[in-house]
Amino acid sequence: MRPPRFATDERGFSLLELLVALLILSFVALGIASLFSHAQLTNASGYDYAVLASEARRSLEDLLATPFNDAALVDTAGTPRQLTTARRGFDIRYTVQDFQVLNWNQLTTPPWPVAATAAEANLKQITLRVGSTTRFLTGRREFVVSAIKIAG
């Protein structure tokens, strides 16, 4: 039995074909690498917002747990107050507005009547603005949350 004969014109890739293939592959790889860096930045930003939301929830729960007539919940007349119980790395400011609701069906149709005095108030709207004071956040991040506290 004779070994098969190979044609003399069959060859592998030439050096030029290999270089062109590597050039095309490098352009594709550069495009994919930029997607990875963008995904990493997006994930970090999402984490930053999650941390701010968690701190806002914790701080709002602290304020909602305070008694209705506590000095911390006096109407601020629109001037933000600094929350002193905030953890390091966060700037938390809040406002409180007093309302006097005589008919609880009014809650579905704002605006609610503003209480003339603090003693007449039976509903408080608390609005928190949470920002980060650390440098790891890219850009200005702020999370705003609001809640209602009812007397009694």
Image (tube, helix red, strand yellow):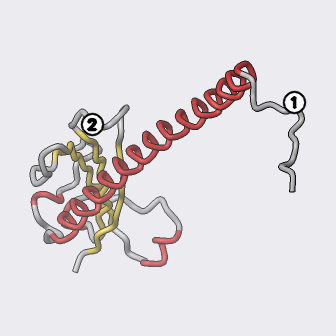
Assign the C terminus to one quadrant of the image.
bottom left
Picture coordinates of residue 103 (x, y %)? 43, 77
Q: Is any part of residue 134 visible from this angle?
A: yes
Query: In the visual, does 4 lie left or right of 57?
Result: right
Q: Residue at x 22, y 47 (%)?
A: 92
Which residue type carries mark 1? Thr
Q: Nearer the viewer, residue 137 or 25?
A: 25
- Using the image, tell me which numbered label, if any, was put on residue 8: 1
Which residue type carries mark 2? Phe
Q: Distance of mark 2 from mark 1, alpha carbons?
A: 65 Å
Q: Residues within 10 Å of mark 2 (few under 14, many from 20)?
A: few
- Using the image, tell me which numbered label, if any, was put on residue 81: none
Secondary structure of residue under mark 2: loop
- The residue sitting at the bottom extreme is 152
Frontmost of labels 2 and 1 is 1
Picture coordinates of residue 134 (x, y %)? 21, 37
Secondary structure of residue under mark 1: loop
| Above-or-below relation of 40 to 128 | above
Q: Residue at x 10, y 54 (%)?
A: 85
Query: In the visual, does 41 lie left or right of 57?
Result: right
The number of numbered discs placed on residues in the rendered structure image is: 2
Residue under label 2, please give it: 136
- The residue sitting at the top extreme is 16
Q: Residue at x 23, y 63 (%)?
A: 58
Q: Are marks 2 and 1 in contact (CB under 8 Å)?
A: no
Q: Nearer the viewer, residue 29 or 42?
A: 29
Q: Residue 61, located in which quarter of the rendered image?
A: bottom left
Q: Residues within 10 Å of mark 1 (few under 14, many from 20)?
A: few
Q: Residue at x 51, y 71 (%)?
A: 108
